[in-house]
Image: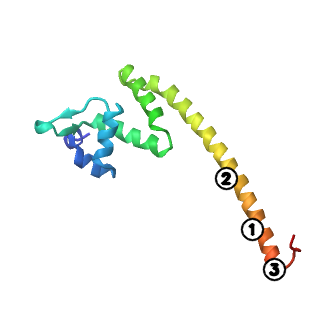
Amino acid sequence: MSTEENKPVQIGVLAKNLGITTRTIRYYEEIGLMGKTERLGGGTRSYSQNDILRLKFILKLKNLGISLKEIEKLSDIFDINKENFTTITPKLIEILDNHISKVDEKMADFSSLRKDIVEYRVRITEYLSGNVAAD
């Protein structure tokens, strides 16, 4: 790792690099997902490489559809156990398994909905082409 990678990053630069707003980062701090953040002169937030990795992890979980509440639970476990990944991993697996189940349920619902829409479309098409007598 180069010295440049270890250099603290200010909030605006970090937000821009990750394609999010500074407000998002501040909100994650407010709800306790980010932990303590260093402040430079004038109160400017400064983020270490560990802070950046943590934020990237939060964003990745969020993109997977994991709720902020669940991410908060993981964050608490991570902090309580002094950033030990062996303690966060079982809970993460549990949350991901629950999420997989929810996705499977949604996929089944969408499949059923798709089938209903296709059947409805066929009936309309047949009706419009005169192949089916009107009720």
> Answer yes or no: do the residues labelled 3 and 2 have beta carbons within 8 Å?
no
**Spot occupied by residue 1 in the image (x, y as percentages of width and height):** 26, 39
- 89 over 63 or under it: above or below: above
- Give the CA separation, mark 1 to mark 3: 12 Å
Q: Quadrant of residue 99?
A: top right
Of the residues tagged 1 and 2, which is closer to the observer?
1
In this rendering, position of residue 31 left or right of residue 6 = right
**Residue 97: image x %, image y %?**
59, 34
Q: CA distance from mark 1 to mark 2?
A: 16 Å
Q: State which quarter of the image contains the C terminus.
A: bottom right
Q: Are the two marked residues, 1 and 3, in contact with CB atoms closer than 8 angstroms?
A: no
Q: Who's the residue at 40% across and 25% down the image?
A: 76
Q: Which mark is residue 129?
A: 3
- Mark 3: secondary structure: loop
Closer to the chain start, of discs 3 and 2, is 2
Which of marks 3 and 1 precedes in the sequence?
A: 1
Q: Regarding mark 1 in the picture, which secondary structure is present there? A: helix
Q: Amino acid at mark 3?
A: Ser
